[in-house]
Each structure stands twice: as structure tokens, then as C-alpha cells.
Amino acid sequence: MMIWREITPFLVRMFDQYPIVTVTGPRQSGKTTLCRSTFPYLKYVNLEAPDQRHFAETDPRGFLSKLGDGAILDEIQRVPELLSYLQVLVDESGRNGQFVLTGSEQFELSKSIRQSLAGRTALLRLLPFTLDERRQAGAADEVDEILFSGCYPRIHDQGLDPSQALGDYFETYIERDVRRIGDIRNLASFQRFVRLCAGRVGQLVNLSSLGADAGVSHTTVRQWLTILESSYIVFQLSPYHANIRKRLVKSPKLYFYDVGLASFLIGIEHAGQLSTHPLRGALFENTVVAEILKHRLNRGRRPNLSFYRDVRGLECDVLHRVGERVCAIEVKAGATVTSGFFDALNRVADVVPDITGKAVVYGGVDRQSRSAGEVFSLARLGNALDEFDVEGRLG
């Protein structure tokens, strides 16, 4: 079953405007399927294949000469030296729409591209399914099922058992990538560290605390976090900073790109365990933040997301900026709307300029319009974000 990906129109538009388009993202986020289905007429080469990689490494000009007018080059980070030869090739032809590159490593690949392909490639990030894409694949919208199974496409395309699939993902992809990206001497300690990170989703990053619990130095924690970010496992949400008369926290908050992987890492084996789990609220928040991030990236926009927290504890989970407008979003995992949902949002709106929308994403199913703002379900978050994009407000 082919799932239409929300990023497709942006991908097509960028291919028409640049000689090269580069699509990065986590392993198993659907990059290859997206590119091959969008550009079926382009030759496809997987650089994970030893023979293709050897050909590209030892005879780059000969390798490229076999590709005709263009190609999809999968996992380009495996042969980074090929980028310089691509630069010469596209400069000589002077045409747009020649090559599509994919890669699963964020920082090193971006660095190589900036050095070799500056101005010649559009950069796109494809994350796992959005909730709308997940629904296309036949997955349920029940909150605990979302938190348990996450959004990796293969789980839903092929009806895989999430625990088995995510366990395999962790063992094969993460361990293989981190061995290549970073010098991890103690893999068992690193595995423990990743699980500790999963237990801290939605919390402020505290390098010393993480290091103490993992039994490593805070310097090592910083290095390991960089590896997890480079592999598209975790991301950090920046705190809001502005010239306002409030003392604001300066540490970012930690989230996983896929909530299902975070659930697996904290030991969740079936959706029924989540209803009373102490981290259910944090996992729900992780889902909302990741969904807003996907909404931005799929439309070719910078994330422009932050959170607000001052030293006295006043907090807003997400400040979502679109142009000069800001939507303040609070996340509540409970299924019952209470009168206090908007208390913190109203106080933050008094402090942060440009807030034109206030919303609460909750664990229920009904949408409600209140005088203070909108309340809507996790399943309809995408629709609400579309509204804000167009109207600058919700409701």
C-alpha cells in the first residue's frame, strides 16, 4: 500500500529548482520509498551495496558516467567524496532536476554538503509518518496505541509487532550507526544511556545528572547526545529567549523523533501498559512536539519551535512561530477538559509578545472552543496546525 507523504509537493518543487535534492532523516523513515515513487524514471543506486560503493569510491567519474541524465543515490554518506564529483558534473550541465541524494546521518552529511554542494542542493528532512500518514496505513488513532507503536512506516505498512520491530531497529540500525559515527568503547554503557534518555523525554537536558546515572562523564554525555542527534534518534527543543523582564531557563528539552522507540526503550511491551504508566504524559508531549516538527519540515519550513519556562516554573510546552505570529500550545494527556487548562497559557500570553493563538492538545477526542482558546485531540493536531498556518489563529 503506497502512502502519500506530506513532503512530496515540496520535494517535487525543489527538484525543479535545484540540480540536486538531498533528503535526510532516520533510517526506516521512508526516504527510499518516497524518492523512488516520486521519481520513478531516475536510475536508483544503493551505496550500502558493497559493489556499488566500491565502484563509486575507486572510480567516481566512471561510476557517474553510467547514470545518464541523473539518478537517486541512496545513503550518500557512505561515499562522501562523491559529492565533489557531483558538483563538477552539475555545474557543467547547468540543469536542474538531476540527482536525488538520501542520507541517514545528519551532521557529517550536512557538513560535507556545505563544503561541496553549497547552493546546488535543496536540503529536506523526512521524519517517520505523521499521524495523518499513519492513519492512511490503517493505524488506529487511540492515544496509547500511538504512544506504543510510534510512526516508523514499516511497522504500519507491514503490520509488524512494534516491540519486535523496534527492538530489531535498536539492535541493528542504532548500534551499527553509532559504531561508525562515534568511538563507543563500551556499548553496554551506551545502551544504558539511550534508555536513560528515553526516561527523560520532555525534561530539561542535564548533562551532569545523565552522566551520573549512566556512569560516565558529562563530556561523554555531550558526545553521545551528538551521536544520537546525528543518527536522528533524539532532538533538543530550544528554550524561548527574548528581551523580556523574566529570568528564563537556558537548557533545552530532550525528545525522541519517534515516540514508539522511546516507549520500547523504557520497557513498554504492549499498549495496555501505558494507561497508568508514570511517563505517559511525557510520551504524549513527545508525540505532540514531534508532530509539530514534522508539520514544519514537510512544508519546507524551519522548525521555529521553542518552549517557555521561567525560573519560577511558569511554562508553556510549545511556542510555534509562523512569520510574525506565535501559537502557544499546552499539552495535556488527560481525556477530560478542565477549567484550568488555559491558566498557564494566559499568563504566558501576558509576557510573550505576538501570541495570536492559544491551544491545548489533550488526550480526548472532541474539539472544544473556549473563550481563552481551542482544545483539540492529538489525532486532529495536523488540521489545527494547517488552520494556524493560514489564519494565524485557531478556531
Image (cartoon, grey):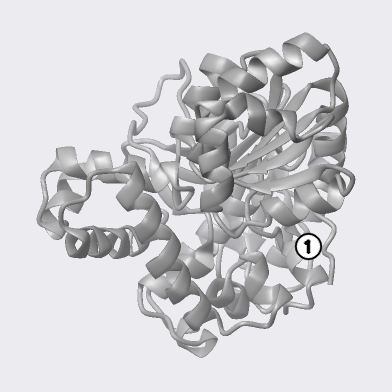
Q: Name the amino acid, label 1.
A: Asp
Quadrant hosting residue 350: top right
Q: How many labels does the image show?
A: 1
Q: In this view, does 304 lie to the left or right of 19?
A: left
Relative to 240, does residue 172 appear above or below in the rendering? below
Residue at 37% of width from left, 75% of height from top? 278
Q: Residue 219 appears at what percent x and percent y?
A: 16, 37
Residue underneath mark 1: 132
Quadrant hosting residue 159: bottom right
Quadrant in which the N terminus is drawn: bottom right
Q: Nearer the viewer, residue 390 or 104?
A: 104
Q: Is residue 326 visible?
A: no
Q: Can residue 56 be seen in this view?
A: yes
Q: Nearer the viewer, residue 27 or 19?
A: 19
Q: Nearer the viewer, residue 357 or 157?
A: 157
Q: Which of 177 and 204 is in front in this view?
A: 177
Residue at 63% of width from left, 65% of height from top? 151
Quadrant hosting residue 29: bottom right
- Neighbour class for label 1 at 10 Å: few (<14), some, many (≥20)? some
Q: Is residue 172 left or right of residue 208?
A: right
Q: Residue 42 appears at what percent x and percent y?
A: 84, 42
Residue at 64% of width from left, 53% of height from top? 291
Q: Residue 84 appears at what percent x and percent y?
A: 57, 18
Relative to 79, does residue 261 appear above or below in the rendering? below
Q: Is mark 1 on a helix, strand or loop?
A: helix
Q: Residue 134 appears at what percent x and percent y?
A: 73, 67
Q: In this view, does 335 lie to the left or right of 241?
A: right
Residue at 42% of width from left, 43% of height from top? 229
Relative to 86, does residue 275 appear above or below in the rendering? below
